[in-house]
Image: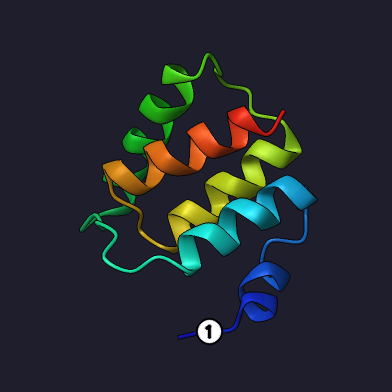
Amino acid sequence: MKQHAEIESEFKEGLTHRVVAVIRSIESTAGWDHSSKQNETYLYILRAAQNVGCLEPFSKEQSALNNYLQFKKAGRKMCDYAWRLLAQSQ
């Protein structure tokens, strides 16, 4: 497993302390669901963002989170968790 700093360095554009906190929370929790396709992950991202009232175009901060979720091939639960955590931190 990659270290937090390695993962975070891949998503520097738009990376804020809130996105770092979300990434660290996800990385410290085992058993997340994953999707088999990038397209599937993007649909989960859009749905999760919409559930907290965010629509495209995404801010740099939101895009950094989305890039991380795409990298992880996040499933529905991971996307929902990440977006809710980001929304609550604002």
Q: Nearer the viewer, residue 24 or 63?
A: 24
Q: Position of residue 30 (x, y in %)?
A: 33, 69
Residue 80: which quarter of the image? top left
- Seen at 24% across and 56% down, the residue is 33
Q: Which quadrant is home to the C terminus?
A: top right
Q: Nearer the viewer, residue 62 or 25?
A: 25
- Seen at 72% across and 46% down, the residue is 18
Q: Nearer the viewer, residue 24 or 64?
A: 24
- In the picture as drawn, the residue positioned furthest to the left comes out as 36
Please state if 89 lies on the left or on the right of 54 as rendered.
Answer: right
Q: Please give the count of numbered marks on the rendered protein.
A: 1
- Seen at 36% across and 48% down, the residue is 78
Q: Residues within 10 Å of mark 1 (few under 14, many from 20)?
A: few
Find disc 1 in the rendering and name its residue. 2
- In the picture as drawn, the residue positioned furthest to the top comes out as 53
Q: Position of residue 13 (x, y in %)?
A: 78, 54
Please state if 27 lies on the left or on the right of 80 as rendered.
Answer: right
